[in-house]
Image (cartoon, coloured by chain):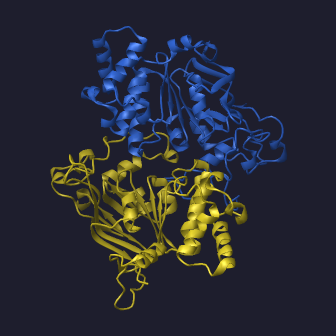
Chain colours: A blue, B yellow
């Protein structure tokens, strides 16, 4: 994957609310190589979208980056002024939002929206911008006729393709996608993912792909980061994480997607519910739901990601002691007589 | 009470299926002037059988007609034509509210949205009391109390008193869906129609709700029609499957066989598009593009032909019938006839 494109160091960000500060991203660190595809998985409220918005410096008014840095090719995005960030945003790093219906302006044609993005960052003639817009639409398999269409005239899948074309129109090196296919049907989702993969091979950009659908991420990512209650709890190569999770939360998530073609076995998911980030539990935030938790897990600071070798990291202090857990791919912790 | 069903003239047939649809059609006329005379073809020639005590997954993408099918079975609206047969008894128009109530006691619906389906201004007690009161199922106050507790405890919400006094917003999504399921089972239905009951829940708690539904089915002996867009979830929950596309059932049969060895090109497409990491991390690209067609002007012939990589001229000309492949498998595709 070559050199590092993005390095996130101890990033914390959150929202000021009437009830207090909600630290939605808490001390998150990871790095992303050039051309790498990183999947970030977690449930609603785990901070994965806040992480994306913090990197893009698109946090809402009541939100802020508390501490830490986000180094994009060595320059700290978190420390830049708004004008400096503007110079990077969309030209070097772009984002595809979850709801293409809301992200596109309903009263502007597709062509106007695509050329707007060009004019905002480049001084090119109208004809050049239009040619570029048509070229980008062709890249996502949409005919240039559609430049004159309005968002409501397009299907959900086409709108999301337009969003991808718009994100890539200035040839950014980093593409952040926040649940880009969640609202789409499975066949459309698959065709969009294949398109992203094809474009990534052709254009060489890096991707951070955020979703709650771990079964999908495992197939498409080089690396996976698993977030829980604002913390990154496990990180590593996707296939290894799937075959041999080293954090009980990852294991629980893997145990939440029934198999399509493999042997059918009872799966239990995870008991309990995600904690309230206004007053997170002490110690490991997953401890109250963890089937392997011991008393020491619920005390002190949340455990940090520690390297396990082979590019893998886990925030569980007992990632492979064997006493509590450390499952082999052939026998994922048998749920028989489990917690349900 | 006849429950809006034609009473059997002889003894009721032995081991009749819990539910049968025969060539059911449901179109929704469009009211705008520009679309005068047109209709949304939400269900066309839908036939399916849900065995007594069985579970049938109705799988399809959005706009495939699966929710309309559930609504027609629940008789939230009536079918245009075709037969609806419950426990061997054909449905006929309701004569009065008592019949409609009796039908709804037998056939219950679990809705997708655990947030929208519980009245936010009512306590769980008042939400859960209603089915017992409406159907006259409780014998006095003490009995009602006992039934409320039972209803909550069998969906894993205990102690019941803790939950009865709360409002829906004080519960998590998973707990709310459990209240919904408790309400469904309160009236002791024989058929439960579950419309994507876990799709709006967080992934880590979905399995808990699915397992609870499987346990309830065993204990209560109900039959499930389980609606989902997720093939893997359908396989986990149901012994049989029917795959819908654009208002028609394209393939049905035992779940494992249909998933392992799909005949219809659409079902194969759905399978290859579904995440399946355990099958290996290298996959073949999809061989069909496009999206579900408009149901206002559905394509002539097979509704999948515009996207089908195997389409032949005859696919455009007439709608293929459901071919019987034996062993309970049926396929609506000319390929199956070869």
Residue A177 can be seen in this image:
yes
* Residue A158 in picture, x, y percent from top left: 35, 35
Q: In front: B280, or B193?
A: B193
Q: Is residue A109 above or below residue B15?
A: above
Judged from this view, the residue extending furthest toward the front is B121
**Residue found 32% across the figure and 65% down from its top:** B330
In screen coordinates, is A330 left or right of A144?
A: right
Q: Percent position (x, y) of residue A254?
A: 60, 47
* Of the pair A1 and A272, the residue shown nearer to us: A272
Quarter assignment of residue A284 = top right
Residue A307 position by quadrant = top right
Q: Residue at x 63, y 38 (%)?
A: A46
- The total of numbered circles placed on residues is 0
- The answer to which image quadrant residue A189 occupies is top left
**Image spot of residue B55 (x, y percent):** 47, 68
Can you say which quadrant of the picture contains the C terminus of chain B? bottom left
Quarter containing the N terminus of chain B: bottom left
Left or right of B99 in this view: B177: right
């Amino acid at each position: 994957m070559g050199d590092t494109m993005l390095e996130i160091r101890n990033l914390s960000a959150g929202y000021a609310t009437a009830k207090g500060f909600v630290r939605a991203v808490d001390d998150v660190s990871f790095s992303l190589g050039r051309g790498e595809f990183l999947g970030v998985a977690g449930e609603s409220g785990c901070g994965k979208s806040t992480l994306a918005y913090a990197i893009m410096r698109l946090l809402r008014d009541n939100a802020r980056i508390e501490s830490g840095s986000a180094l994009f090719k060595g320059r700290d995005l978190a420390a830049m002024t708004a004008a400096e960030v503007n110079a990077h945003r969309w030209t070097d790093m772009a984002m595809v939002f979850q709801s293409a219906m809301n992200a596109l302006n309903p009263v502007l044609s597709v062509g106007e929206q695509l050329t707007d993005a060009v004019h905002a960052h480049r001084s090119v003639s109208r004809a050049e911008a239009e040619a570029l817009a048509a070229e980008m639409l062709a890249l996502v398999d949409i005919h240039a006729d559609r430049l004159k269409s309005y968002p409501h005239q397009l299907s959900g899948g086409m709108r999301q393709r337009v969003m991808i074309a718009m994100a890539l129109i200035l040839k950014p090196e980093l593409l952040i996608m926040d649940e880009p296919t969640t609202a789409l049907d499975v066949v459309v989702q698959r065709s969009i993912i294949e398109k992203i993969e094809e474009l990534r091979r052709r254009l060489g950009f890096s991707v951070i792909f955020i979703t709650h659908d771990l079964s999908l991420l495992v197939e498409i990512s080089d690396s996976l980061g698993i977030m829980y209650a604002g913390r990154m709890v496990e990180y590593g190569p996707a296939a290894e994480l799937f075959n041999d999770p080293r954090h009980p939360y990852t294991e629980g998530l893997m145990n939440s997607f029934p198999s399509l073609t493999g042997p059918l076995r009872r799966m239990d998911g995870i008991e309990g519910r995600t904690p309230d980030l206004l007053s997170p539990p002490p110690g490991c935030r997953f401890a109250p739901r963890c089937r392997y938790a011991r008393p020491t897990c619920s005390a002190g600071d949340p455990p940090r990601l520690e390297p396990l070798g082979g590019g893998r990291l886990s925030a569980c202090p007992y990632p492979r002691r064997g006493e509590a857990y450390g499952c082999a791919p052939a026998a994922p912790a048998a749920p028989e007589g489990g917690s349900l | 009470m006849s429950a809006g069903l034609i009473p059997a003239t002889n003894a009721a047939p032995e081991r009749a299926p819990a539910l049968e649809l025969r060539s059911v059609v449901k179109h929704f006329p469009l009211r705008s002037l520009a679309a005068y005379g047109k209709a949304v073809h939400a269900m066309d020639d839908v036939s399916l059988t849900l065995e007594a005590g069985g579970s049938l997954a109705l799988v399809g993408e959005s706009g495939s007609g699966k929710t309309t099918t559930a609504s027609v079975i629940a008789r939230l609206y009536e079918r245009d034509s075709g037969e609806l047969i419950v426990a061997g008894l054909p449905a006929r128009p309701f004569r009065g509210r008592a019949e409609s109530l009796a039908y709804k006691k037998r056939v219950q619906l679990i809705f997708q949205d655990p947030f929208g389906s519980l009245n936010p201004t009512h306590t769980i007690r008042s939400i859960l009391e209603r089915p017992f009161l409406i159907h006259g199922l409780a014998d006095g106050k003490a009995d009602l109390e006992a039934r409320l507790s039972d209803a909550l405890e069998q969906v894993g919400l205990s102690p019941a008193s803790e939950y009865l006094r709360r409002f829906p917003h004080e519960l998590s999504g998973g707990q709310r869906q459990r209240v919904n399921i408790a309400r469904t089972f309160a009236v002791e239905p024989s058929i439960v129609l579950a419309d994507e009951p876990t799709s709006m829940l967080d992934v880590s708690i979905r399995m808990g709700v699915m397992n609870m539904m499987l346990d309830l089915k065993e204990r209560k002996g109900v039959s499930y029609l389980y609606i989902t867009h997720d093939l893997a979830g359908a396989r986990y929950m149901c012994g049989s499957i029917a795959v819908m596309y654009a208002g028609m059932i394209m393939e049905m049969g035992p779940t494992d066989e249909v998933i392992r060895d799909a005949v219809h090109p659409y079902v194969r497409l759905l399978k290859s598009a579904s995440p399946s990491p355990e099958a290996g991390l290298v996959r073949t690209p999809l061989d069909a593009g496009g999206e579900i067609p408009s149901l206002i002007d559905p394509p002539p012939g097979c509704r999948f032909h515009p996207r089908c990589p195997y389409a032949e001229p005859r696919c455009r000309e007439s709608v293929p019938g459901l071919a019987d492949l034996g062993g309970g498998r049926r396929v609506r595709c000319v390929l199956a006839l070869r």
